[in-house]
Amino acid sequence: MGSLVYIRRSNDVIPEILGKVTEENDGEEIVAPTHCPSCGSELEMRGAHLFCLNRLGCSPQLVGRMSHFASRDAMDIEFFSEMTASQLHQELGVNDPADLYTLKFDDLVKLDRFGEKKANNLLGALEKSKSRDLASFLYALGIPNSGKTTTKVLADYYRSLPKIMAATPEELITLPDVGGIVAESIYSFFRDPVMVSSIERMLAAGVNPIAEEPAVVLASPDNPFFGKTVVLTGTLSTMGRDECAKKLEALGAKITGSVSKKTDIVIAGESAGSKLTKAQELGIRIIDDEQELLQLLGES
Ligand SMILES: [Zn+2]
């Protein structure tokens, strides 16, 4: 047996398994590559992972960044898949999410598997995405170490993209759920000229991310979530995590991303992992029965 070798082509994308390094000669062993199989750049070993650092010239990284940008929790661009990203990259030289907003009907309609209908659908979906909310836009940018909970905290607190882009690490670290690494990641992301120019091009094309109004708390203070700090983990079968978070917020709960002594309740869905274990260790109240959850939410 040996350890698996992974290659990571960008910061937060699922690594591709290349194979395993083994001492046995069973024909399955591989030699860890020194250069990226896609773009030929030299790879860097960090921990157990190999990284291709050629962010701007490595096709799978460019395609991955655009697919993430368009995904449901991000800009939610319908009629757009990883295959679309790859096709637009190869055939129209689309390299950056900002390029998507320059696409023209005449360019799209000529592509394979496109027709007038799909071209119009995609252009309509891109148009619609221009008014996506600020938290989703920030998530779409793919800031390293920042998931949807973090981008929501940023959007709720600053309520303006220019303010977030100007925030210092010292300021960011005071926000709930933002530790030193995350604060540094956000700060350096907005100091990267490539990212800044991409954002400026999107804004010039009419992308206008606005912070959502904070959830109006209509609930009475005696519901079980009022004033409680809640962490969601795992997959729920009856609703998405975003949707559940909104319902909890409307009941007066505060949603955070990591379990600590300050956490009051952990809601654990299917395949909950380390957050559930930590909650058990800390003796935090756990809701892992979805029927019970629905009842507490007042939905059954
Ligand atoms: Zn590469």
Image (cartoon, rainbow, N blue to C red):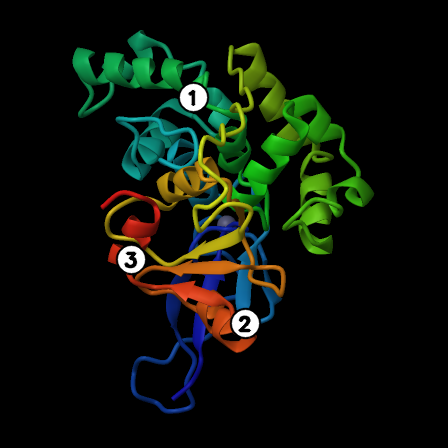
Cα gap from disc 2 to disc 1, whole angstroms: 34 Å
How many marks can you see?
A: 3
Is 96 left or right of 1, judged from the image as shown? right
Q: Nearer the viewer, mark 3 or mark 1?
A: 3
Relative height, residue 139 to residue 271 (above, below): above
Q: Secondary structure at mark 3?
A: helix
Vertical comparison of 193 with 33: above or below: above
Give the residue type at disc 1. Leu
Which residue carries the number 3 mark? Answer: 292
At x 67%, y 39%, the residue is 189
- Mark 3 CB in 8 Å range of ligand 1? no
First-in-chain label (2 vs 3): 2
Viewer-proximal residue among 59 and 83? 83
Q: Position of residue 68 (x, y in %)?
A: 42, 39
Q: CA distance from mark 2 to mark 3?
A: 41 Å
Q: In 3D space, how far apart are the residues under numbered discs 3 and 1 (Cα atoms)? A: 44 Å
The answer to which quarter of the image holds residue 121 is top left
| Res 32 visible | no
The answer to whether the residues at label 2 and label 1 have Cβ atoms under 8 Å apart is no
Residue 257: image location, x then y, percent: 54, 53
What x and y, as percent, mark residue 54? Answer: 57, 46
Q: Residue at x 42, y 26 (%)?
A: 93
Q: Amino acid at mark 3?
A: Glu
At horizontal 29% and vertical 83% (from top left) the residue drawn is: 27
Q: Say which of 161 and 110 sits in front.
A: 161
Residue sitting at the far bottom: 24
Given contact means CB atoms under 8 Å apart, are the residues at marks 2 and 3 in contact?
no
Residue that badge 2 annotates: 48
Other-residue count near label 3 (Cα within 10 Å), few / some / many at <14 / 14–19 / ≥20: few
